[in-house]
Image (tube, rainbow, N blue to C red):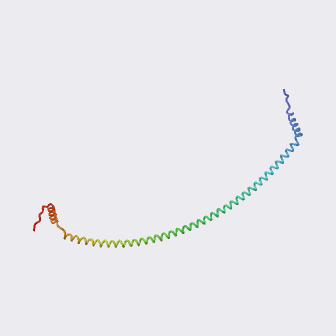
Amino acid sequence: MADPKKPGADGAADRNVDQIRDILFGGQMRDYERRFHELNQKLEADLARMREAADKRLTQIEKRIDDQLDKLGKLVRQEIDDRTGALADLESRVQQAARTARAEINKAVDGVSDEVAQSDERLRAALADLHDTMAARAGDTEAALSRASTELRADKVGREDLAALLTEFALRLKGDFDLPKP
């Protein structure tokens, strides 16, 4: 079977292996460590420079953005002022146009009212004239009718006379009526 090794012997063997490794590869390992350390310092320096450059760029970008926002704010305020002025101008023009239109409409309404009043007066006068004319004609017609009625009564044939006349006419038509001989 395998012979058991002593625990103290394993620790000494490990130290021996480390010493051998240090002898064989020690120079290279120190060189690698030095290179890694230089590379690490170089990376940290580059990273610091890049951070600085990025910070500068961000600061410049922020400044540009702030400048642009200020310009846009000024433009917006100017546009608001311009539009407010234009709106006020338009409002005053609309109010003036409304006043003018109202005055013209009132003038036209007054003119139409005057024309209607004059027309009403003319029509009332014509109606009064027509009423007077109709009353005169009615009086004339009534007088003429009265005269005609009086004449008709004077000239009218009585019932009995008309009956005798019609009877005689009927008999003559039949041939039954003999006229007295003179």
Q: Residue 96, image x and y in percent? A: 54, 69
Q: Residue 128, image x and y in percent? A: 34, 72
* The N terminus sits in image quarter: top right
Q: Which residue is more in the foreground, 26 or 135?
A: 135
Left of 37 or right of it: where is 177? Answer: left
Q: Residue 3, image x and y in percent? A: 85, 28
Left of 80 or right of it: where is 102? Answer: left
Q: How many marks?
A: 0
Q: Which residue is more in the foreground, 61 or 177?
A: 177
Hey, which quadrant is residue 83 in on the image?
A: bottom right
Establish if 19 lies above or below 101.
above
Hey, which quadrant is residue 29 in on the image?
A: top right
Left of 150 or right of it: where is 79? Answer: right
Establish if 3 lies above or below 64.
above
* The C terminus sits in image quarter: bottom left
Q: Residue 54, image x and y in percent? A: 75, 54
Residue farthest along the right direction in this orientation: 23
Q: Which residue is more in the foreground, 108 or 39?
A: 108
Residue farthest along the top direction in this orientation: 1
Establish if 64 lies above or below 139.
above
Hey, which quadrant is residue 160 in on the image?
A: bottom left
